[in-house]
Image (cartoon, rainbow, N blue to C red):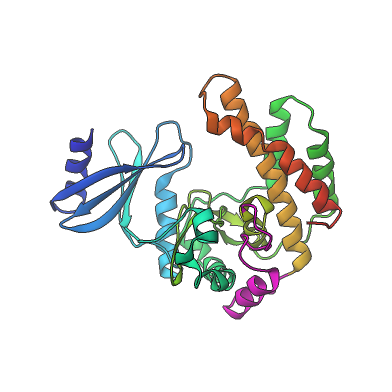
C-alpha cells in the first residue's frame, strides 16, 4: 500500500523522489499522509470509500481561499483516481492543532492573546472568497437538515425539540450568502508560537450566512473547558472588531448568538449520531461512545444558552 501510494505521488508530482511516507491520524472521511518530495515536506489527503462529499470541490475551495489571501496550505495537486476517489496534495505547515496544547502550553503563551483577533481577520478573508469560483457548493438549511436527522433517529429528545422551536421562532434575517468554512474552530487551525498559521479541513465548506462561522467558533464545546467565549482564548468584542476591521460585514451579536445556539444544538445531534454508530455495532469505539455521553452536556449548555447564562 505505502509503495503504491509513493509511486502514485511521484507520478502526480512529476517523478520526484518520495521518502518518509507516514500515515497521520485523521477523520472518518479522509486518509492523511505526510511525506517528503525531493526533500520537501508535503501532505496528501485521500477520500475514503463511502464518503459522499466530493474532495475535488474541497480542493477548489482551498484554491479559491488561497486566491482570497486566506491563510491556507498551498494546493499543489488535486486528482481523481481511477477508482473515483479523489486526493489532494498540499504544502506541509508546521504548528499545533491540538486545542489543549494551544490553550495551555508555554510555547503558545505569546500567541494566545492574539488569536481571537487573528481568527476574526481570517474569517473576514474566508468570507471574501469568490462564490462563483467554487461551483458545486451546497446551500443547506441547517434547521431542516438536522430536523430530518432527528426524525430519522426515531427517538424523543425533548430538550432538542424545544431548542429547535426556539431556533425557528428567533431565526435572524440572513446576511448576503458567502462561502462559509463550516467547521472553523480549534482543531482545524494550525497555530505556532507566533499565532495563526493556517486554516485547514475545508470539507464542510458551503454557501451560507457569514455569522454561522463566527457562531460556530464560539460554541461552548469548542472552548474545551476554558472560560473565554472565543475558542477559550478571547472575547466576542476582540473577534468582532477584528472581523470588521479586516473587511468583514457588520457583526450582529444577536445573530452570532443564534448561530452559537444552533451550533450547540447541531453538535448535540452529531453526538447522538456518533453514539448510534457505536451502539449499532457498525463501529465499536470507545471514542464514539464517549462522544455519545456528551449529549447531556450539550443539553445543559442549551438550557444555559436560552437563559442567557453561558
Q: Residue at x 68, y 34 (%)?
A: 149
Query: What is the x, y in percent for residue 231?
Result: 61, 60
User: Which residue is found at the position 41% from the left and 66% from the top?
Assistant: 66
Q: Residue furthest top?
A: 281
The answer to whether residue 56 is above or below residue 189 is: above
55 sits to left or right of 258? left
302 or 110: nearer the viewer = 110
Q: Is residue 68 left or right of residue 248?
A: left
Magenta stretch bounds? 224-251
Number of callouts: 0
Between residues 78 and 226, which one lies in front from this camera angle?
226
Can you tell which quarter of the image residue 74 is in?
A: bottom left
Quarter of the picture containing the C terminus is bottom right
Q: Quadrant of residue 309?
A: bottom right
Q: Nearer the viewer, residue 306 or 234?
A: 234
What residue is shown at x 72% (from left), y 44% (from top)? 265
Amino acid at each position: 500500500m505505502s509503495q503504491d501510494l509513493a509511486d502514485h505521488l511521484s507520478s502526480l508530482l512529476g517523478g520526484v523522489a518520495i521518502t518518509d511516507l507516514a500515515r497521520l491520524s485523521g477523520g472518518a472521511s479522509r486518509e492523511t499522509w505526510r511525506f517528503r518530495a525531493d526533500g520537501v515536506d508535503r501532505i496528501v489527503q485521500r477520500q475514503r470509500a463511502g464518503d459522499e462529499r466530493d474532495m475535488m470541490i474541497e480542493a477548489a475551495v482551498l484554491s479559491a481561499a488561497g486566491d482570497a489571501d486566506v491563510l491556507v496550505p498551498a494546493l499543489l495537486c488535486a486528482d481523481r483516481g481511477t477508482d473515483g476517489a479523489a486526493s489532494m496534495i498540499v504544502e506541509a505547515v508546521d504548528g499545533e492543532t491540538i486545542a489543549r496544547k494551544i490553550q495551555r502550553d508555554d510555547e503558545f503563551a505569546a500567541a494566545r492573546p492574539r488569536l481571537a483577533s487573528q481568527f476574526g481577520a481570517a474569517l473576514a478573508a474566508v468570507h471574501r472568497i469568490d462564490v462563483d469560483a467554487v461551483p458545486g457548493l451546497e446551500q443547506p438549511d441547517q434547521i431542516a437538515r438536522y430536523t430530518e436527522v432527528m426524525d430519522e433517529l426515531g427517538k424523543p429528545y425533548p430538550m432538542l425539540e424545544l431548542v429547535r422551536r426556539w431556533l425557528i421562532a428567533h431565526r435572524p434575517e440572513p446576511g448576503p450568502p458567502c462561502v462559509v468554512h463550516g467547521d472553523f474552530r480549534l482543531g482545524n487551525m494550525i497555530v505556532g508560537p507566533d499565532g495563526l498559521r493556517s486554516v485547514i479541513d475545508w470539507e464542510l465548506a458551503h454557501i451560507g450566512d457569514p455569522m454561522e462561522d463566527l457562531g460556530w467558533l464560539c460554541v461552548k464545546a469548542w472552548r474545551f473547558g476554558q472560560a473565554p467565549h472565543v475558542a477559550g482564548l478571547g472575547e466576542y468584542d476582540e473577534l468582532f472588531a477584528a472581523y470588521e476591521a479586516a473587511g468583514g460585514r457588520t457583526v450582529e451579536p444577536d445573530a452570532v448568538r443564534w448561530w452559537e445556539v444552533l451550533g450547540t444544538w447541531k453538535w448535540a445531534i452529531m453526538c447522538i449520531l456518533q453514539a448510534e454508530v457505536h451502539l449499532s455495532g457498525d463501529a465499536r469505539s470507545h471514542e464514539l461512545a464517549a462522544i455519545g455521553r456528551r449529549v447531556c452536556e450539550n443539553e445543559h449548555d442549551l438550557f444555559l444558552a436560552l437563559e442567557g447564562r453561558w
